[in-house]
Structure formats: C-alpha cells, structure tokens
Amino acid sequence: MANSNTYLTTPTKTPSSRRNQQSQSKMQSQSKDPVNAETRSRFEAYNRLQAAAVAFGEKLPIPEIVAIGGQSDGKSSLLEALLGFRFNVREVEMGTRRPLILQMVHDLSALEPRCRFQDEDSEEYGSPIVSATAVADVIRSRTEALLKKTKTAVSPKPIVMRAEYAHCPNLTIIDTPGFVLKAKKGEPETTPDEILSMVKSLASPPHRILLFLQQSSVEWCSSLWLDAVREIDSSFRRTIVVVSKFDNRLKEFSDRSEVDRYLSASGYLGESTRPYFVALPKDRSTVSNDEFRRQISQVDTEVIKHLREGVQGGFDEEKFRSYIGFGSLRDFLESELQKRYKEAAPATLALLEQRCSEVTDDMLRVDMKIQATSDVAHLRKAAMLYTASISNHVGALVDGAATPAPEQWGKTTDEERSESGIGSWPGVSMDIKPPNAVLKLYGGAAFERVIHEFRCAAYSIECPPVSREKVANILLAHAGRGGGRGVTEASAEIARTAARSWLAPLLDTACDRLCFVLGSLFEIALERNLNQNSEYEKKTENMDGYVGFHAAVRNCYSRFVKNLAKQCKQLVRHHLDSVTSPYSMACYENDYQGGAFGSYNRFNQVSGNSFCFELSDTSRDEPMKDQENIPPEKNNGQETTPGKGGESHITVPETPSPDQPCEIVYGLVKKEIGNGPDGVGARKRMARMAGIRNIDPFRVQNGGLMFGNADNGMKSSSAYSEICSSAAQHFARIREVLVERSVTSTLNSGFLTPCRDRLVVALGLDLFAVNDEKFMDMFVAPGAIDVLQNERQQLQKRQKILQSCLTEFKTVARSL
C-alpha cells in the first residue's frame, strides 16, 4: 500500500490548458480550489478501492474505462499520450499478453513521471520507477513470469501501474490485449479466441466504459471488430468510439460534404453515437517528454488547420469541433470518469459497508474455529448437532420431501443406472421401464420406483428350458427313492434350481440399486441443511471449513448404507433359500392360480402391498411389453381312475424313462393296485395325492410302461414336456411368494427403517465414541492451525483496507 502521506500531499489537478512551466503561486492557488480538491479526493478514493479490489479479488462496480481494439489500432500510442511521456509500451506488446490498469494521478509536484507497480497478490505498491526503460522491463518480466507459471499464452490477471505526473490527467484506463486474427508463431492456435473471450469478459460489466479504437483507414462497413463491440454493448450507450490515425484520412477529403458525412458516421453507429477523431505523432525517435507533448499539441493544431483550409468549405465546426483532436478526447474521458465516479459514490458506499460487515463475520468465524481447537467439549457438541441435523434431513427425504428441487437434485431411471454403474437387470434381455421412469426422483420416491422396477424385472423372467439329460437325472433319482410323487418332485426340483440361479442375481442388483439411491441422499441432505431453517439448523454452529470432519461424516454414512445393503442381501438370500427349500410347500400350494395371489400373475398389475401410480407423460394405450410367460391354466377336467385291476396284471418297471407319458404317477401301482376286486383302495389313494390328473389305461410292452391305448386312439404328450410345463408353474409360484410375500417388505424394513431410526446413533458411535485425541484428528490436521492463522491475517488485512476505503467514501459522500 502506498504511504498515506502521498495522498495527502499530492496537489490537485489544474485545467488541461495549463502551460508546461507553472509558477509556484499558481500551483498553490489551484491546490486551494475546493472543486479540484473534491475531484481529487474522489479520484484517490476510487484508486485505492480499485487497488484493493485487484489485490483481494473483490467484485466491486467501480466505474472504469476499458480500452479495446485490434492490434496496431493505436491503443498503446494513445496511452502514452494520456500519460504525457513515452515508455516504449508498444515494444513490450503488453496488450497481447496481460491487461494493464493505468492509474494516472495528476500531481503538480511530480515534474518527472513516478511509476509504481502494485505487488502481485497484494495491495501494496513498490518503490517509484523513474526510468521509462525500467517501466517497460517490469511489464515484460511480470508478463513472462505469470505466463510461464500458468503455461498459457494470455492471462486475464492485470498488472496495476500507478503513474504520478504533472502532465497527466486524473484518469484510470484498463488496457486490454489487442484483437488478432491469427496466432503468432510459437503460440497456440486458440490464442485469438482466448484474447477475444478475455476482452469480452473484461468489458461486459455494465459499470465499465468501453473505449473502442479503430484506425481511419478502415471503413465502418468492413470493420473487423465492430460486431464484437456490439455483442458487448449493442446500443453503444457506454461505448466511446475513437478513430485513430486520423491524419492518414485527411488527404482523401475534397469538400465539406465528404468531411461531414465521414465525421457523422451515420448508418453505422447510430444517431446518438459520435466518434472522436485523433492523430498522434508518428516520429518514434527518442525525444524529451516536453518535446513529446509539444508534438501532440502540434498534430492537433495541424489537423484542425487542414480541415479548415485544406478542404473546400471547411467542416461543420459547431457540430464536430469538440470531437476532433487528442486534447478533446482527453478532457472528455476525464470529465466522463469523474461524472461516473460521482454518480456511483452512494452505491459504492453502501456496498463497502456490506463488504466490511461480511469480512467482520468471516473473522468471527475464523476466531471461533481457532478457539474451538482448544475447546474439545464445545466442538463435540457442535459436531453432534450438525450430524443429528444431517441424519434428520436424510429421514425426511426417505419419508418424502420436495426440497431441494427434484428437477435439479433428482434422477431419472436411466440416470440412476448410468451413475450407479449398474446397467440392465441380469438375465433380463428387454429394457425395463417402470412407471415414472422419466421423472427426476430422490429419497423414498426413488426407492419405491426401484422396488417396482425389480418386480417388473422378476416377472419378466421365465423358467429357462432344461435339457433332457437334466430332467432324466432328476427324475430317475426321485423314482429310485420310491414314493408316489416322482414327476411332481422332479418338476419342483427343476423350478427350485432355476429360481436360485435366475432370481438371486436380481436380488443382489436390487440391493445395489437401492444402496445407490440412499447413498445419493447425503449430498441432498447437505443442501437441505444449508437452505432450510430447521430446528437443528438454528442451534448448530457453522461447521464449514472442517474438511476432515466433513469427510469423516461422509465416510461413516457411506459405510452405514453399504452395511445395510450387505445385510439386506443376506436377508433376501435367506428368503430365497427358504422358498426354494425341498421342505417348502410353495411348489404345492394350489391357491396361487386362482386364490389370493392370482392377481400377481402379471407384473404390471397392482399388488396389495405395492401401490404404484403412473405420473409420467407416457401413452397408456401402449400394450405392456414386459409380461412374463403365464403358466398354463389348471386342468379342471374330472379325474379318471384306471379300469378295474381284477382283469389286468401290470408290472411297473423300476427305472422309468423321461419320454414316457407323464400322466403315470410312479409308485402308484404296486401290489396294492390289485387289492380288492374293484381296486377301490387304489382309487382312494389316487384321489388323495397331489399332481394327479388323468390316468389313462396302460399296458406293458417290451418290459416297459407305455401310456395310451392303441384301441381307443387316445394320445398324450411326453413326460419331458409335461415336466417342463409343470416346472414353469412351480417357478412362477416360487417367484410370486418371494416377490410378493418376502422381498418387498424385507427391503423396506432393511433399508428405510434403519435410515429413519438408527442412522443418527450409528453415525454418533462411529464419530464420537472415541477419545479426545482421535476426535480432534478430524479437526486439527497437521498445519491446520497455521492455515487458520494465515486466513485470519489475510482477513484482518482485507478488513483494514476496506475500512479505510469506507472512511474515505464517507468523506466523499458528505461533500456530494
């Protein structure tokens, strides 16, 4: 920061028409001018505020002039003319690398220019530099150092230079990189686009005045960069257009109409926009500063003289005289900037008060963190309240909530699949689209959608075909054990094996998808905790900045949800093992076909314990594509009993064939079949046994059992086909019992109930059931105290600067 005495002792600005040699008495009289003193104090206040804004990255609406234009359009020469001395600014090509903020301070005591550069990342200024060559060297070295560090061709970070001189106005200009069409050799091809984007960013804020330069040899209709200016300021309300190198155009004018038409620029800039026409000395030889300024004044005089005497009829002086010459442009820029300063002072004062208050709050926050590092009990309490608040928000999301906005935080079914890394359901070839798949949901709503999607996937799986060899192995093994239910047991075993193979992966996938849905709630709970004024939030301290603690809470929550998924996988696998156990009666219950669970034969029908409303905008006339293969309806035909056994003697083979008719019930006909003259005992036993359908007359042929009677023409299908059909029915029954009776309720109680009731306890045990030393590891990382102390020092420094600027602006506001 520059010494405050510099601001107090710097004389005020004198009129721009002053002579180079001024008497001491005139300097003293002008320094006592109250108008000039007010202007100077306002200018100094904004300069100090601008320096603070650059150093601390403050976004303050300070009125500023931004010079833009193409390369070689004369921006560098104009800056030197405004400064009143040359420092070879064109040779360092600063406009092609970094912006340069020139703070020109009119100081009558500075008979030689004094230039000071603001330190990088600080509001302090370095020692004064008098040599023009040294100024250029500093600009070049700073530019190269930053570009090497950032590994870029251009950088938006500005260089701030304060120039105090008796022959410069009170003016601040931001010089920007010049527009180029093609990158220089050795530069990236994207350099022109980067420059254009950076200049647009610098010129876009509405509080900045655009100083657009274009040389006179370019016609308005063919201007390369006029469209770029229109994109920034379409109406040219805050744009000052400067036609540079105007002396190159003078020789083309022959009469007054040509001159006036050109000066008006009608048809291109609008009626309210009047460009300035400037010519500067072309001689780049080394001359003294006094000679440089004399040449500038001489060029202005020669331009006016040519327009008056070299053009027939002269020009409309009343309309255009105030827009011709460098002196006119300099006076206008200075007056316009002072006008904007005066208009913006009240709003700037209010904004400074707000920023000072914010910085004070930030300092209190850092002080509390520093204090908390030594107060473990206080920190434990704050951390517990924060954790409880997050847990409550998770519970609210599970129960159903619409804040924050689901449109922003929710996910569609496809987004859930993509982000979770879990694509299609295993074993399901078709694309499962549950109701509301296109809606963005989270929490309990997303959970229920996944449950319904699981049901859709489960009911889309049919019992897979089984090879004859497998059927033979199972059938023959059961027949060898004896008993009367060989076919039924064989088909049931096939169904149980298929259910374990095909439904188990679905259950695991459902648990993984639900784990992802609940895991996503942590970020949403954090957002709710920030935005919603709940009971916990009012009592909870600000825990921002404790990176280690936030990471620990996130990890504990993630472990909690993953453990729930692991437990639920074990539970649903247990249910699958139970329903596929040989001791389970699921395969033999007959009430599934037409009883209480008959409505579940198709997955898209609404169940009693899983209500689902279709809310998305989809066609309801479209047939469902994901229906499962419905098992054959139960044969309601009357059972027939075999003929009276008194007339026939049957020998049952010990090893039946899979290709024999499946209507035979193995073990049914033994020696008992001949008991009684009419076979009454056998018919009674047949009526009591499950799976008995039609018993046709049979006969012995070549030592084996064969169904059908060639005499009556009756036919029957093979045992293999009927066993596969029966297995499909058993598979459907197992699936219904598993999905409708077990899995849905298990997943709800296994995932949602713990999130409501046990989450806060689980997180509390993981985070707080530790000794103080381990607890503080989450808050005091190595070097954390030093970081907090450095942050406090920066805030204190920033507060001091802003408070100083606020005091100055209060003084300025009283003089308005």
Image (tube, helix red, strand yellow):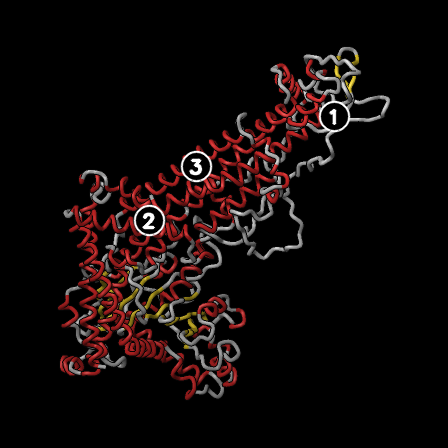
Q: Quadrant of the N terminus?
A: bottom left
Whole-Å distance between the Cαs marked 1 and 3? Answer: 49 Å
Residue 205 placement (x, y as % from top left): 38, 68
The C terminus: image quadrant: bottom left
Q: Where does the image place residue 228, in percent across and percent down from the top left?
A: 47, 66
Where is residue 92? Give x, y as percent: 34, 57
Q: Amino acid at mark 1?
A: Thr
According to the picture, the residue beneath numbered tag 1 turns out to be: 641
Cα distance between the residues tagged 2 and 1: 67 Å
Identify the residue under disc 2: 391
Residue 135 shows in this picture: no
- Left or right for 776, reference 617: left
Tell me if residue 390 comes above or below residue 207 in the rendering.
above
Alpha carbon distance from label 2 to label 3:
21 Å
Kind of element beneath mark 1:
loop
Q: Amino acid at mark 2?
A: Ser
Counting from the top left corner in percent of width and height, residue 510 is at 49, 39
Tell me the residue at 34%/43% (across/down).
557
Q: Residue at x 18, y 46 (%)?
A: 785
What kind of element bears circle 3? helix
Quick one: which residue is furthest to the right in this view? Answer: 711
Q: If you read the primary sequence from the N terminus, does the residue marked by circle 1 or circle 3 appear first? A: 3
Amino acid type, callout 3: Cys
Please report whichever mark, 2 or 1, sits nearer to the chain's N-terminal start: 2
Other residues around mark 1 within 10 Å, as few (<14) / some (14–19) / many (≥20) = some
Q: Hey, which residue is sitting farthest front in the picture? A: 677
Residue corresponding to mark 3:
568
Q: What is the crowding at mark 2: few (fewer than 14 residues within 10 Å), some, or many (at least 20)?
A: many
Q: Are marks 2 and 3 in contact (CB under 8 Å)?
A: no
